[in-house]
Image (cartoon, helix red, strand yellow):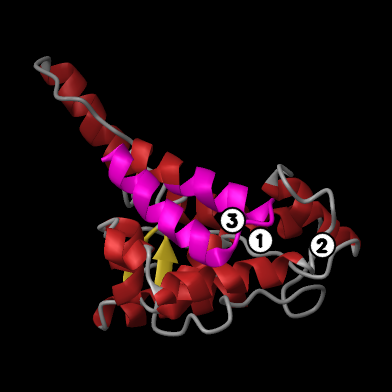
Amino acid sequence: MFEMIVAAVGADFYRKALVDADPEALNSDTMVKVLETMKMIKQYTDPGAPGRDWNLATAMVIKGEAGMQFMGDWAKGEFTAAGKQPNVDYIAMPAPGSSGTFLFNVDSFIMFKQEDPGKQEAQKAMARLILQPDFQKVFNVNKGSIPVRLGMPRAPFDDPALRSMNDFVATAQIGGLVPSMAHEMAVFPPIRGAIMDVVTNFYNSDMSAKDAAAQLASEVEAAM
């Protein structure tokens, strides 16, 4: 939720704060407003929210025990598995105010350099198979995400996926794509850990937003 609110402030500020880990951005009036917004949202969560796995929160929405959830599009796979239809049983939409910014996370495979020609061919085969249209269709339709491969046939995908695919391309054209800090795509693990610790402590305590912003800058500098 924190980085979604940061993204709503704009791609430039997001990059300064959660990609460059700029101390001035972290300890700024804008960050204070972000943290105040986050604390304001807390009043709409139940006491059991801290530490709850995202899929359990999704299940609460599906069962009608919660009204909404801030989550990536993979949560849509839970709705699909439960037999729910978009725009009939639920609505999937971007975070309010985030127009012009697209926060992305990519499932990634790391392939280490190999001297054995057979292993090199195996790596190429794996990469080729993963990017094949049929695999991209089956994987993403069931997971709820969108394909990493552009130009895919659109027929198998539902309305939220099609809108997300359109938004991804449109946002890329205006420079609004930003990598997820929470999913370790933006900063090194020690910096991510420092940000997550401060934000979690702030969210679950009576710490002021101004103090939290100052602590964010301090802890991130120490983690660098």
Question: How far across and how far down the image is residue 21, in percent?
Answer: 29, 56
Q: Is residue 165 visible?
A: no
Give the numbered dot on residue 63. none
Vertical relation: 160 (above or below) 54: below
| Image quadrant in which you'd find residue 159 | bottom right
Identify the residue under disc 1: 76
In front: 65, or 195?
A: 195
212 is within the stretch colored magenta: yes
Looking at the image, which residue is at 75% across and 55% down?
Answer: 58
Looking at the image, which residue is at 76% across and 53% down?
Answer: 57
Point out the stretch of residues depicted in magenta. 195-224
Pick out the residue farthest to the top.
116
29 is within the stretch colored magenta: no
Identify the residue under disc 2: 61
Vertical relation: 80 (above or below) 201: below
Q: Earlier in the sequence, mark 1 or mark 2?
A: 2
Circles 1 and 3, Cβ within 8 Å, touching? The answer is yes
| Image quadrant in which you'd find residue 25 | bottom left
Q: Secondary structure at mark 2?
A: helix
In front: 221, or 125?
A: 221
Question: How far across and how far down the image is residue 24, in percent?
Answer: 28, 65
Chief SS of the magenta region: helix
